[in-house]
């Protein structure tokens, strides 16, 4: 399937990817209304589903980024497989306002909290995914992009793309971007702006901060393919929680993972999706 390239934001030009400046996001204490926002203040969102394997998989807890509530996802080694692998995730299969396809330009915001007891593992933890459905000619499909915690202690965005009408594991182009250091015991805020494209028109901008060190900084500007050449009826959706693909085949250095997410939003501007803002 090929080893994905691991590229820091500073090395984008060396890698042959286009880089271009983007306007700095404006700070705002009061967030504009986003077309889709999940803050868990009124319980589960009616359009958000769960890939829930067991009684301790996904629950609401009072460790919020803002407000009083956030979602807690817990996965243990040996939990039953869900959708073919080991995961405890929320998804937006039924939330059309989150669906994306090549040609769309969309802002995404969310916060992720790692407990102070979080331990590094020898294999990655996937915590957010942009996942397209498979076309009729495909038996399965990689996510267009996913955010992970790496064994190196970095947040990494992996991007998958394919210009072929029928994608196979061998035809997928994989690129990885290291964004920032993982810092347990605090909220990590992310905002991404994707111009989705299976061709050269694709663009990604990314911003990052923590609640203990506020102040948005640009961590990614990249151009080029970032999704799949899908059928006109095919789109993608969002997933967040814990996905631990390595556990499908054996143990790693840890046997349980707990993670929190809050203020997941999809919109047309930075202020609409800013996860650090209140409404």
Image (cartoon, grey):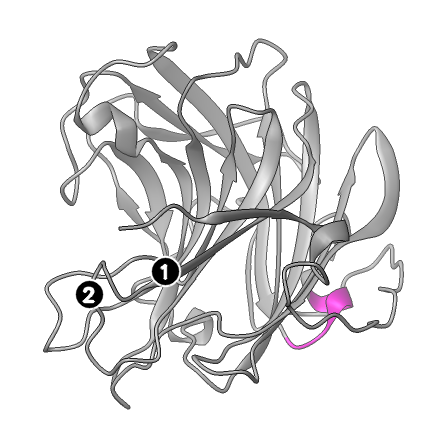
Front position in the image: 26 or 179 = 179
Rendered position, 248 above or below 82:
above
Front position in the image: 94 or 237 = 237
Q: Main secondary structure of the magenta part?
A: helix
List the residue tagged with mark 1.
Answer: 92
Residue lying at 74% horizontally and 70% vertically, measured from the top left = 19
Rendered position, 15 above or below 76:
below
Determine contact: label 2, label 1, CB under 8 Å: no
Neighbour class for label 2 at 10 Å: few (<14), some, many (≥20)?
A: some
Residue 198 location (% of width, % of height): 43, 79
Q: Is residue 72 magenta?
A: no
Secondary element at image label 2:
loop
Residue 126 found in image quarter: top left
Residue segment shown in magenta:
268-272
Secondary element at image label 1:
loop
Residue 78 location (% of width, % of height): 18, 16
Rendered position, 23 above or below 183:
below
Residue lying at 29% horizontally and 45% vertically, measured from the top left = 50
Q: Is residue 271 magenta?
A: yes
Residue 66 location (% of width, % of height): 71, 40
Quadrant containing the C terminus in the rendered view: bottom right
Residue 127 in view of the camera: yes
Report the side of 260 relative to 76 (left or right).
right
Residue lying at 33% horizontally and 11% vertically, measured from the top left = 255
Report the side of 113 relative to 84 (left or right).
right
């Amino acid at each position: 399937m090929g080893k994905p390239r691991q590229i820091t934001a500073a090395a984008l030009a060396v890698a042959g990817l286009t880089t271009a400046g983007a306007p700095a996001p404006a700070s705002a204490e009061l967030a504009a209304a986003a077309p889709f926002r999940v803050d868990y203040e009124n319980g589960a969102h009616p359009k958000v589903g769960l890939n829930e394997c067991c009684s301790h998989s996904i629950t609401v807890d009072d460790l919020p980024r803002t407000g009083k509530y956030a979602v807690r996802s817990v996965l243990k080694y040996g939990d039953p497989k869900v959708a073919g692998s080991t995961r405890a995730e929320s998804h937006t299969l039924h939330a059309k306002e989150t669906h994306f396809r090549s040609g769309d330009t969309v802002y995404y915001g969310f916060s992720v909290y790692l407990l102070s007891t979080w331990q590094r593992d020898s294999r990655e933890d996937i915590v957010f995914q942009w996942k397209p459905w498979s076309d009729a000619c495909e038996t399965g499909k990689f996510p267009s992009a996913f955010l992970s915690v790496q064994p190196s202690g970095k947040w990494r965005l992996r991007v998958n793309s394919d210009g072929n009408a029928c994608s196979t594991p061998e035809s997928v182009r994989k690129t990885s971007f290291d964004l920032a250091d993982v810092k347990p015991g605090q909220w990590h805020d992310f905002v991404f702006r994707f111009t989705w494209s299976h061709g050269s028109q694709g663009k990604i901008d990314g911003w990052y901060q923590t609640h203990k060190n506020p102040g948005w900084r640009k961590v990614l500007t990249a151009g080029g393919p970032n999704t799949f050449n899908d059928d006109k009826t095919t789109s993608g959706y969002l997933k967040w929680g814990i996905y631990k693909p390595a556990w499908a085949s054996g143990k790693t250095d840890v046997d349980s993972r707990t993670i929190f997410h809050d203020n997941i939003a999809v919109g047309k501007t930075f202020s609409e999706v800013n996860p650090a803002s209140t409404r």
